[in-house]
Each structure stands twice: as structure tokens, then as C-alpha cells.
Image (tube, helix red, strand yellow):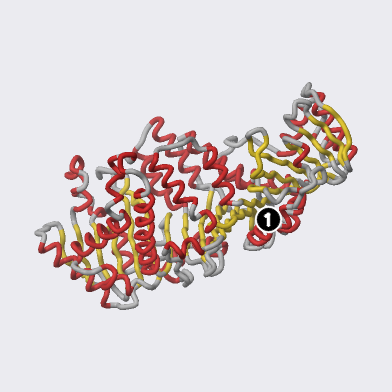
Amino acid sequence: MRRLWLICLLLLLALGLVAGPAVAAPVSDLTALAASFPESTVFFAAMRTDDGFIETLDGVVGQVRELLPSAMLPPLRLNSLLDQAVGELGLGSFREAVRPWLGSTAALGVSGETFAGMPGFLLAVSITDQTAAAAFVENFLNQMNSEYDTGEQGSYLLFSDPRGQGAFAVGKDVLFLTLSTSDVPGLRDDFTPLAASTDFSGVMAQLPAASYNLVAYLNVPALASLSERALPTGSPETEAMQQLGERFLDAVGPAALGFTILDGRSLVMDVVQTLGSAAALEAAGFDLTLPTAAVDPAFAAHIPADVPLVIQGTELNTSVTTGFHNLRVMGSLIQQQLRSLPADQLDEDVRWMRAVNPGVLLERFITLGFTGLTGLDLQQDVLPWMDGDYAAYLRLLPLPEDSASEAAPDFALLVEASDTAGPAALIDGMAAALEDYGVTFFERQEIAGPALVLTGLIPAMSPRHEAALQAIRELDLIVGSGDGLLVAGTRAAATYSLAPQGETLADSPAYTEALGYALDGAQQLWFMNTRAFVPVIDTMIARETGRSQQDMREARILAGLLSSGSISAVASPDGSAVARFVLTLAADPLEQPEA
């Protein structure tokens, strides 16, 4: 648990280390150094390096410290750490030795070209004083006892390893670190800048925020090719699947990432993934149809306010129909690829796919199983009315001390129905099928509408603990309908969603907060409220002793760091997609129980 706590805290701080409202800059400013990187760059990242950025990082760390018990996170200031790092090199302080010549941005790029068998890289730092920056580089190399040659070429002062294993090039307004001076702009004849690439400028323009503190560009097809070249030769079927993937590399376009912070405590990562040429996908028969309607926040009125995890979406029927179609197409392509290889070269466990389309097999397994359970055809009788919003949520319910477990899982799937008769017909079909199969652990009830209750299904799935679990009524499964809504889930969740009482998720400040940071027109929204886990954690703390109790106390501290988290996503008709990941630090520390 200590390792988990440290990892989660470091991830939280890592997001803070690339964020800060006082220094957020337009993408065009952050990517100015892209003019110094070659067009063949497959990965490019740029960040702010000015004093305002460092001060904001200290502010984020300070906020985290205030949310933790005293002395858990020692007082740290980034300026002090930088002074210590530079001082250990014998170069003085960061303020004295680096800040006078350091500019406002730095960038790292990885090239699709190779040098001595390795991908080329280029590190660039904007500078304001060429002479001072060159003096720092020379002092650094001397302190490290490095051998180097000096020289001048064009406007650059060069410091090169005589064995050709690296070089510094200090220009008028930029300092480069690279494997070879041939990568430095102005020192090569065939230089075309990354900034001139329409792929680069196009994907960067799709980042949704007005400003960021770190941005990154990924040429996804080129990166995939680099990775494949580095992989060892595999089995014939593995190579066949790699060849199949290469057919569609052109269909994947470049991607962009942007990091910032909003309102002083919401750490944000935006991701843009574009579609390249869709011709290969369309020629193969893939369907690119996606849901187009935006999530309706009012749908949260069917969900309890204390839910920690929720997924909301729209047009479930579109997603399922498209998924089935593409599953069949992919299965057919796998068949074709495997048929190109002699049967005796294939493992026995994949040889059957030469004769049977695995996508069709999986689809039939799902649809026939559904028909067997309900007596209905999924694609003709059910999916047509699943064209509204849907949500799935999960929470843990504390149980009394005399229960066999500290908590019970409580979950539900809600689907909005345009045909109010559809959910009722589905429940009737399930009841008839269970009667035909002679199943005895179900009953019909009226819970704000027709409901089917399976009273012992979950305990029956765990024979070793069945007797103890049978007494936990919260583990009953309910499938019910009412007011154009289909609900399937455990007793507490399903009962609440069929007839909400008290505060709902739509009333939750954490949910409202998350909506405020979601992308406009989001077709999918994932919501997290870690503080909603606290009642269950407190139940476990009361029952546990020793190391286990301490682990639970640390988990409680971790749950208190955030007030909300969310992922929102928007897909465009052109095939590009934007996703936003948000973690919002809590405004106040969580009160801790007595030890």
C-alpha cells in the first residue's frame, strides 16, 4: 500500500509539474522551437522554463502538502532543488549560473532518422545570451572531466565529443544538445523544419484549450514503424498480424497532447488523435460511424449522489452495431492473413481461424446467448430503442459488523429507451426464459415498474462462500424498467435508479465541478469522486488491525487528495477525436479519524 500511495502521489505531482496558470502560453509560443527541429521528427515536446512556471510548480506542491497530514510531505521548493543540483556540479547556484541566459522554453525531439543504430534526438533550449550559455557548457564539460573539441560554424559555438558521441551547439538564441552536429539547423543542407509540416500544425491547432504549459506531438505511424523495427522476429502468426497492422498505418494520423492547470487546482491533459487516410479502412469494409449526440447531464438524476465511479455515454445502439460490423471485418482480415501462411507453420490453437471467422464467432456467441436469455433478437428487438443516453456506475456499500464482508459491490447499467414498451418486453422475455429453464432463484416484483429479481445468482457464482453471501441482500440482481428507462444492477443501485429519492448525482458538487471542465459536446464522460470511497474505508479501518489498518488509513489520505476527476471525449465526423483528462485537487483537507 505504501508503494501504491507513493506512485499515486508521484503521478499527481507529475501532472502538477507540467501545469501552471500563471505561465500558460499559446500553443504557437510553446512550439516556436519547432522551427529548429527537422520535419522527420516523430516525437516533439516543448515546455515553459521561466520563473513564473517554477513559482507555480511550487504552488501546486504546496497545495498537495496542505491536503496531507502534517510532516507527511516535507517543505520543498523547486528553486532550492535546482540550486542544489547545479551546486553539486560545482557551477554555483541555478539563479547565478543558469537563469541569466536561460530563455522561456525548452524542447525535445526524436527523429525518424537513425545515428549509429539509435534514433536521433535533439534537445533545444531557448537562450538570451550566447556568450554566457557557452561559458556554462564549457564549465559543465570541465567539471565532468569530459573530452571535447571546440569550434565555430556559422553562428554556432560547437563543443563536440571527439569520438562522435554527442555535441553541444550554442547559437544566438538557442542551445542544442544532440548526437551529431549534422542534426543542428543551419549545419545541414537539406533542412526542412517541423514547423512547416501541415501534419504538425494541423493537429496542434485542434488542442482545445487556449494555452498550455507543455505540449507534445507524436507522428503515430512513424513511431509504430520505429517500434516494429526494434522488435525481435516472432512466430509466423505474430509476423502475419504485424503485416496486417502495417496495412492500416496510413489510416492513423498524428496525435497531440497538451498539459495545463485551470482555476489553480485542476490538472488537465488534453489528447488529440487524428485520422490519416481512411481509404484503406473503407476499402477493407470498416464502418467509421460513431455516436454524434452529446451526453445529457440531466441523466445523472437517475444516479445516487454518493457514487465514486460513473461512465456516461449516448447512442449505445450505434456503438454496438458498429462494433459488431467491425468485428466481422477484422475477423475476415485475420482469416485472409492466416490463409497466406502454410497451415503447418501455424500453432494448433490459431489454425482453426483459417476456417472460421473469429469475429463472426464472437458476435454469434453474444447474440445467440442474448436470445437464449431473453427470447429476443438483440439487433432487431432491442438495439433500435437504445438510442438515448446510458450510464454505468459502481460504488461500495458498507455492511454491518455481523456481515460476512466489510462492503458489498453496488452497480447498475441504465439505458434510456425511446420506446417505453421495449424494456418491459425485455423483462418479460427474461422471465419466460428463466421459467423455461427451470431457474428457481428469481421472482417478479413491482419496484416503480416491472422488475425481475435474481436472489442468489452472485452467491451461486462463489460456491466456497455461498452460504455466507446468501444472507447479503444487497447482492440480489434486479432488472427493471420505468419511465422509458431500463435498469440492471444490484439491489440498492437498481432500486434507487428506478425510483430516485433524496440527492442525486445531478445535485453533487463534485459532479457539477467535473462538468465544468468537460469538453463541449462530449459524447462520453467518465466521472470519479474518490472521497465517496471514504465511508467504506472507515468501515475497514474499524475492522482491521495492525498493518492492514495502517494501509487503509493511507488509502483514506489518498482518497482525500481530490475533489473530482473526469475524462470527457468528443469524436468528429472526420474521424479525429479529442479527450480531456482532469484531476481537481480538493479545496480543503479531509478530516482524519483518530488513531
Residue 353 spot, x, y in % from top left:
30, 50
| Number of numbered discs on residues | 1
* Horizontal arrangement in the rendering, residue 211 relative to residue 239 (left or right): right
* Horizontal arrangement in the rendering, residue 155 relative to residue 7 (left or right): right
Viewer-side residue, 450 vs 439:
439
Viewer-side residue, 144 vs 70:
144
* Pointer 1 residue: 212
Residue pictured at 45% horizontal, 71% vertical: 298
* Horizontal arrangement in the rendering, residue 146 relative to residue 324 (left or right): right
Label 1 SS: loop
The answer to whether residue 541 is seen in the rendering is yes
The answer to whether residue 22 is seen in the rendering is no
Q: Is residue 465 above or below residue 415?
A: above
Tell me the quadrant of the picture where the N terminus can be found: top left
Residue 196 spot, x, y in % from top left:
73, 57
Tell me the quadrant of the picture where the C terminus can be found: top left
